[in-house]
């Protein structure tokens, strides 16, 4: 058997691994290689400064090479999917040219997701991941250019843009989730997993039995598997099945020697080991998704490494969360918006016009649902359900419901609706004791609750036909102007006016 590969003629995904992906992205003009930057805080600082200067969706992926102290070709990659073109190429089947705004683009992505048929992985007998093997006394994680991503991080983090694979000890079901991994010494890590996450549930089940939890961490990862590791797949299926469905063929995997777990054969760097039930170390702090060093240092189970596999000239994939915007928020907005929209549809909320999980809310804390109101209470129903649904149930703060004339992805429109259609005395619903974690900067003890609010920023249903008219150019006059003055508009705005 050979390493499973995607056939670009049969699959909407036109690459087989991270290296083919990088070659294609470079040909698009969306990859920048930077040489000679040290791993100690400077990589992360450069990425933060670049993405903050360019803004959301406009910065290239950044590949660091010739890292001081490491062989040429030992590389670190940031910002894999943080642009429309890179994200579209990663998932396949999306035409960026025909998507004129975020919601139209999101609709294409949702249509792509609806066609997915989950395909389980298959074992293969060859993989370039075995080009380099460190085992036993030879293991030295510091042979890889593991960065300190943020200035105040508690150490070097090898797992950020990663996938941690675990198995449910009762059902045998697999999970691949993105959880941060800190390196403590040459052979030892810790891995923080928030309570309620699937990987944490698996680990807890082993620990309750007095057993260590086997785990495989893919820290040099195929972009579509990284997307999967942050995607909510249906119960009973795994993220590896989702990747197979996206590619239209099974993901090739090899069997882990020490854990019996599957290892994606197209990986760059893999750690095999176990979470120890009897051993803990202080972990953190780390700059996390809300944009803070929240949670401080806490003891976490040790992740004892038994084997390291990596390709020649390996690529460590990195994701440094910062105050928004940062290098892996762009794609998070799309995947979580799509999942929330899907969940609301399955909960039978009718006439949804759009959903957006905002980057400014760190991809979780500020979420907007647009509806065409059909009955009394429709807007509250949509808001209350959305506030508690995966993927935003964890850490959510604000859920805003707006009418269908509001683009939920445009903050200026959302805030306008909040300022003109919402009566704070009547239109705010506040809930307490909701799901949060130590990463939440407003959690001050180990009771991981938060409160959240639903803001009904819709025109009151009883006044939907007699509310004040909106002062804006009508669609009819707009079309007339575009026809009559198209050249003038092009001179003024280029291709911005559609």
Image (tube, grey):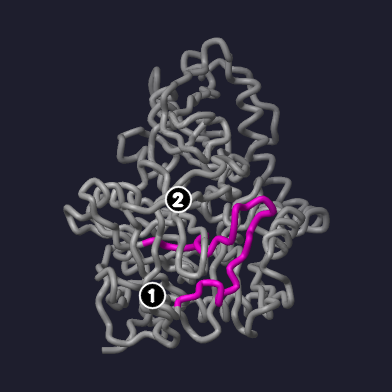
Residue visible at 49% across and 38% down in the picture? 438
Q: Position of residue 434 (x, y in %)?
A: 42, 28
Could you tell whether 277 is left or right of 189 in the image? left
Q: Which residue is mark 2?
A: 192
The main secondary structure of the magenta stretch is loop
Q: CA distance from mark 2 to mark 1?
A: 20 Å
Q: Tell which of 428 and 485 is nearer to you.
A: 428
Q: Which badge, 2 or 1, is on the more N-terminal residue? A: 2
Residue bounds of the magenta highlight: 139-164
Q: Is residue 83 magenta?
A: no
Q: Quadrant of residue 387?
A: top left
Res. 103 mark? none
Please say if 247 is above or below 386: below
Q: Which residue is mark 1?
A: 307
The 10 Å Cα crowd at callout 2, few under 14, some 14 to 19, many 20 or more, is some
Q: Position of residue 492 (x, y in %)?
A: 82, 54
Q: Tell which of 177 and 377 is nearer to you.
A: 177
Q: Tell which of 416 and 80 is nearer to you.
A: 80
Q: Residue furthest top?
A: 425
Q: Is residue 160 magenta?
A: yes
* Callout 2: SS: strand
Please say if 393 is above or below 148: above
The 10 Å Cα crowd at callout 1, few under 14, some 14 to 19, many 20 or more, is many
Q: Would residue 307 be seen by someone viewing this image from the given angle? A: yes
* Callout 1: SS: strand
Instruction: Assess whether mark 1 and mark 2 are in contact (beta carbons under 8 angstroms).
Output: no
Q: Would residue 402 be seen by someone viewing this image from the given angle? A: no
């Amino acid at each position: 058997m050979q390493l499973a590969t995607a056939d670009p003629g049969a699959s909407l995904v036109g690459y087989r691994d991270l290296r083919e992906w990088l070659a294609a992205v470079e040909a698009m003009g969306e990859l920048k290689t930077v040489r000679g930057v040290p791993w100690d805080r400077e990589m992360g600082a450069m990425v933060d400064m670049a993405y903050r200067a360019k803004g959301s969706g406009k910065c290239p992926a950044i590949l660091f090479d010739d890292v001081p102290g490491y062989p040429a070709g030992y590389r670190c990659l940031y910002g894999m999917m943080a642009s429309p073109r890179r994200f579209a190429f990663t998932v396949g089947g999306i035409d960026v040219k025909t998507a004129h705004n975020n919601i139209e683009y999101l609709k294409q992505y949702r249509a792509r997701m609806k066609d997915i048929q989950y395909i389980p992985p298959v074992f293969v007998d060859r993989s370039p991941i075995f080009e380099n093997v460190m085992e036993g006394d030879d293991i030295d994680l510091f042979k890889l250019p593991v960065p300190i991503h943020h200035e105040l991080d508690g150490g070097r983090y090898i797992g950020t843009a990663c996938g941690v694979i675990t198995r449910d000890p009762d059902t045998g079901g697999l999970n691949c989730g993105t959880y941060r991994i800190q390196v403590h010494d040459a052979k030892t890590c810790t891995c923080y997993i928030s309570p309620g996450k699937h990987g944490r549930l698996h680990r807890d089940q082993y620990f309750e039995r007095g057993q260590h939890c086997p785990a495989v961490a893919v820290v040099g990862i195929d972009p579509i598997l990284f997307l999967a590791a942050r995607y909510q797949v249906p119960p009973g299926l795994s993220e590896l099945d989702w990747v197979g469905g996206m590619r239209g063929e099974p993901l090739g995997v090899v069997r882990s020697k020490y854990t019996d777990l599957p290892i994606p054969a197209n990986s760059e760097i893999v750690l095999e080991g176990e979470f120890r039930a009897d051993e803990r170390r202080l972990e953190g702090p780390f700059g996390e998704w809300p944009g803070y060093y929240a949670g401080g240092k806490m003891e976490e189970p040790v992740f004892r490494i038994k084997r390291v596999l990596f390709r020649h000239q390996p690529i460590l994939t990195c994701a440094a969360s910062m105050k928004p915007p940062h290098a892996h928020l762009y794609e998070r907005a799309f995947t979580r918006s799509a999942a929330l929209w899907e969940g609301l549809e399955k909960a039978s909320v009718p006439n949804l016009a759009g959903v957006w999980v905002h980057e400014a809310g760190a991809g979780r804390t500020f979420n907007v649902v647009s509806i065409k109101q059909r009955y009394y209470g429709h807007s509250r129903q949509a808001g209350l359900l959305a506030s508690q649904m995966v993927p935003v149930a964890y850490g959510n703060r604000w859920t805003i419901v707006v009418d269908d004339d509001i683009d939920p992805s445009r903050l200026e429109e959302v805030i306008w609706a909040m300022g003109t259609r919402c009566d704070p005395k009547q239109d705010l619903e506040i809930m307490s004791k909701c799901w949060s974690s130590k990463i939440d900067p407003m959690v001050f003890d180990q009771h991981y609750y938060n409160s959240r609010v639903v803001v009904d920023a819709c025109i009151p249903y009883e006044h939907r036909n007699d509310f004040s008219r909106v002062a804006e150019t009508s669609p009819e006059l707009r079309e007339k102007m575009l026809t009559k003055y198209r050249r003038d508009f092009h001179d003024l705005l280029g291709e911005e006016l559609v």
